[in-house]
Amino acid sequence: MKKFIAEDSFWELFPEATIGVLVARGLKPGAEVSEEDAAEIARGLDRANIRAERFLTSDTISDNEPVRVWREAYRRFKTKKGARCAIENLLKRVLKGKPVGSITPSVDIYNTVSLTYAFPTGGFDLNKIEGDYRLAVTAEGGEPFLPIGEEKNDPALPGELIYLDDAGATSRCWNWRDSQRTELNDETRDAVVVFECIEPARVEDARGELEALAENLSRYLGAEITVRELVTADNREVVLED
């Protein structure tokens, strides 16, 4: 049995957080996505870049509400210098007139939904996660981590909030950067997608993102959605696979 577990050390920092967790099985390889569906995924990402402008009420990135709340959140745990929340990185591109572009169909889908709801969202290859998938504050640090696009190990710091499994960190500084080891690609068959909401007033938006992820992964990539759950302080773990 493989579980997702948000540990006590996380809830001590963010007792009102909500974590969306979705498992999508049987994803189509990128080469099997029809031209029509690929074009629709691309159009959806284009529309999401435009819709994201509604979250940008200031030309100063840190003054925009989705960014401001995450900047405050990142002050509660140890981070690498310069690390920023994933949604800030996406919104900054929109603000600068450099829209988020296509990567792979599965990544494009979760980026589309992330931009639509302004929640940081990440996808991981479920079959490459070793043991339970956890969200926790490190005690001693040192969990190995090879960032996407890099060639050098960049281990977690003591007191850093990370996603991790038995083999090391899968995301550093909560949702700043993801690991090559567990990244989604065109050959991924089973994925776990997670996103974070730290504003209690936006829980219904979190429900909306969860449904949008499920709908789009099913419609365009033929996925079977086997887990669709909101993890809270009262519901701290979910079974990913038996």
Image: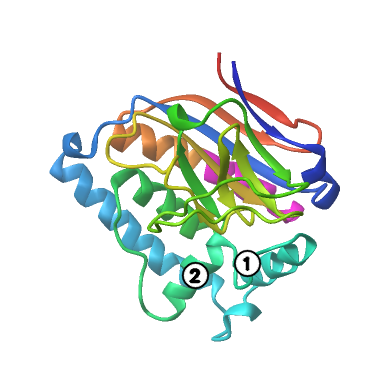
Asked whether, in this view, residue 187 is left or right of residue 59, the answer is left
Question: Dot 2, how many residues are within 10 Å of its Cα: few (below 14), some (14-19), or many (20+)?
Answer: many
Given residues 138 and 122, the one toward you in this image is: 138
Prevailing secondary structure class for the magenta stretch in the rendered image: helix
Residue ID for mark 1: 66
Residue that protrudes farthest toward the bottom in the picture: 59
Q: Which residues are magenta?
A: 199-210
Give the percent coordinates (x, y) of residue 127.
Answer: 44, 27
Give the percent coordinates (x, y) of residue 18.
Answer: 70, 44
Tag 1, which secondary structure?
helix
Tag 2, which secondary structure?
helix
Q: Residue at x 61, y 40 (%)?
A: 164
Give the percent coordinates (x, y) of residue 96.
Answer: 42, 81
Question: Dot 1, how many residues are within 10 Å of its Cα: few (below 14), some (14-19), or many (20+)?
Answer: many
Give the percent coordinates (x, y) of residue 43.
Answer: 27, 57
The mark found on residue 178 in the picture is none
Query: Is residue 204 a member of the stretch shown in magenta?
Result: yes
Residue that protrudes farthest toward the right in the picture: 12
- Quarter of the image for residue 86 reads bottom right
Asked whether, in this view, residue 47 is left or right of residue 115, the answer is left
Given residues 212 and 38, the one toward you in this image is: 38
Asked whether, in this view, residue 7 is left or right of residue 186, the answer is right
- Amino acid, disc 1: Pro
Nearer the N terminus, badge 2 or badge 1? Answer: 1
- Quarter of the image for residue 64 reads bottom right
In the depicted structure, whether residue 159 falls above or below residue 19: below
Could you give the CA–CA distance between mark 2 and mark 1, rounded to whole angstroms? 9 Å
Query: Is residue 33 a member of the stretch shown in magenta?
Result: no
- Amino acid, disc 2: Leu
Residue contact between numbered discs 2 and 1, judged by CB atoms under 8 Å: yes
Residue ID for mark 2: 91
